[in-house]
Image (spheres, rainbow, N blue to C red):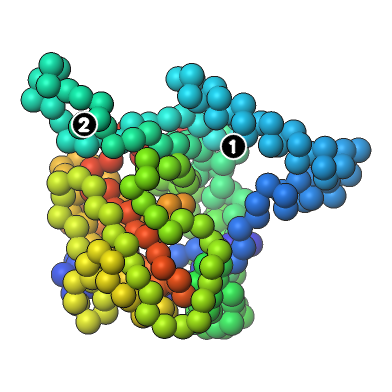
Amino acid sequence: MILYILRKNTNPKSAAFGKHFAYPVIEETIELDGLAEHMSNHNTPYSKGAIKGMLTDMVGCIKELLLEGKNVKIADLAIFSLGIKNNGGAVSEEAFSVSKNIKGVKLRARATGELIAKNLNLEATLKKASATTKVAGNGGTTGGGSTSGENASVSGSDSGAQNGTINGGNSGNNSGSQSGNTSGNQSGSGDSGQGEPGNYRLSIFKYGSGTMHVTNDSEQEINNNDNVPSGSNVNISVVPVAGKVPTAKINGNTVVELTENDGTYTGSFVMPTRGTSLEINSEPSDDLLDNGD
C-alpha cells in the first residue's frame, strides 16, 4: 500500500499554480540490517547475520565493479552504473581539464524487469494518507485528511472522486530513484538529527545554467544558508536548458518530484526540523532514470 498526500502548487509564477498534485509518503527507511531481518523471516534457512553478511559483501562488490567502469544489473531491481557530473564544457579537447570541467562521479540506477513502471502499475495500490500519518524525515504529520473510501488500484479505470485507478499508460513516466555522492558538494545528508520546531539552515546547491528559484509561500526568495521555519513549504521552480529534465534532491538522497508545465518544472517539500541541503541540477547530462532494460 502506497500512501499519498496532496499538495497545492503555491508558486504564482508556475502555470500549474493552484493545482493539487499527489506525492508519496515515506513513513520509514529500511536499512541493510532491517532488510536482512525481513528476509530471514521469509522461511529461509539463513540467519539474519548470514544474510546481512552476504548483502554487505554484495554492496562492496557492486561498488568495486562500478569503479572498474562496469554496469551491474540485478534482475527485477535495477541496472547500476556510474555517471559523470560535468562542470561546464571546455572550448576544445586541449583545454579540457578533469579538475576544472568535472564536478564528480555519482551513482545511477535504472529500473529493470518487475520494477519498471508498467509492471509496478499492475501491482501497486494507492491510499490517501490520514491526518496523523507520520512522515519520515519531516518530524510531523501529513495533514492529508481521512483515508476512508480513498483506496486506488494502479490498473483499470477510474471509479469515483477518490476511488480510482491509474491507467497502465503511465509506463512511460520515469519512476525510480538515484543516489550517490557529489564529491563533497552537498552537506547535511542523512536522516538522523531531528530537532524541535524552529528555524533551520537550508544549504542550496545549484548546478547548470538554467533558471532556478527557491521561494517560500510568501514568494520570497530563499538563498543559500538562509534559516527556514520547520514545517513550512519550500517551493522550487526550474526552467532548464532546452531538452533537459531537471532534478532536485534533499539531503543527498530524497528526490523532490518536479512537475512540468509549459517548460517550467515546479515542486515543493516541507522543511524538516534540522539543517537541510537542497541540490538542484537544471541540466543533468546522463543521469536521468529510464525504465526498462
What secondary structure is found at the residue carrying circle 2?
helix
Which amino acid does the dot numbered 1 rest on?
Leu
Residue 115 in which image quadrant: top right
Residue 192 vertical position relative to residue 147 in the rendered view, above or below: above
What's the residue at 41%, 68% (across, down)? 275
Question: Position of 16 compared to 32: left or right?
Answer: left
What's the residue at 12%, 21% (across, down)? 95
Residue designated by label 1: 77
Position in image of residue 6 (x %, y %): 43, 73
What's the residue at 19%, 72% (across, down)? 221
* Disc on the earlier residue, 2 or 1: 1
Position in image of residue 52 (x %, y %): 75, 41
Which amino acid does the dot numbered 2 rest on?
Asn
Residue designated by label 2: 101
Residue 93 in which image quadrant: top left
Residue 58 in which image quadrant: top right
What secondary structure is found at the residue carrying circle 1?
loop
What's the residue at 41%, 83% (across, down)? 198
